[in-house]
Amino acid sequence: MPKLIFLPHEELCPEGEVLEVEKGSNLCRVALLRGIDIEHACEMSCACTTCHVHIREGLDSLAPATDDEEDMLDKAWGLDPDSRLSCQVIVADEDLTIELPRYTINMVSEGH
């Protein structure tokens, strides 16, 4: 089973987290179910950038971002070449090392 390795984040997972998941799992959904409260203002419909993450290792194992995801990523805070929207990431065979950005462009947390 692949692992999701979340690097420490001051608020969402201060000590980091390692989650074993099934291949084909949605990254955002799994994180939320396991208590990592990733922002997701559009309810995971690829219509915002609040679930933006950096895939620090394992990015090559993922399907490429769609044009819609790329268009949304252009608006994300702290964009870099390994940026993805977690709501669009489907886990493949490899482990993923994930860094949660310090900020999102969501001005008001909706308490998800």
Image: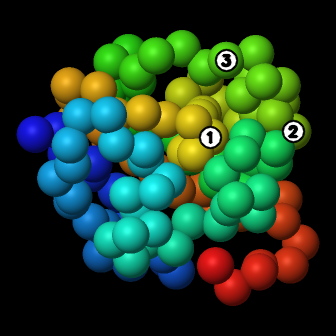
Toward the viewer: 24 or 5? 24
> Residue 43 at what x, y percent from top left?
70, 59
Residue projecting furthest to the bottom:
111
Mark 3 neighbour density, 10 Å: few (under 14) some (14–19) many (20 or more) = few
Residue at 42%, 33% (x, y): give it: 90
Give the residue type at disc 2: Lys
In the rendered view, tell whether residue 55 sits above or below residue 6. Answer: above
Q: CA distance from mark 1 to mark 3?
A: 11 Å
The residue that label 2 is drawn on is 75
Position of residue 77 in the picture relative to residue 23 (left or right): right
For discs 1 and 3, the disc positioned in front in the rendered view? 3
Q: CA distance from mark 1 to mark 2?
A: 11 Å
Residue projecting furthest to the left:
1
Residue at 87%, 39% (x, y): give it: 75
Give the residue type at disc 1: Leu
Q: Does residue 95 appear in this view?
A: yes
> Residue 62 at what x, y percent from top left?
40, 21
Mark 2 neighbour density, 10 Å: few (under 14) some (14–19) many (20 or more) = few
Position of residue 9 in the picture relative to residue 25 (left or right): right
Q: Earlier in the sequence, mark 1 or mark 2?
A: 2
Q: Element at badge 2?
A: loop
Position of residue 34 in the picture relative to residue 63 (left or right): left
Q: Element at badge 1?
A: strand
The residue that label 1 is drawn on is 85
The residue that label 3 is drawn on is 66
In the rendered view, tell whether residue 79 sits above or below residue 60. Answer: below
Give the residue type at disc 3: Thr
In the rendered view, tell whether residue 64 sits above or below residue 79. Answer: above
Please identify the quadrant where the C terminus is shown: bottom right
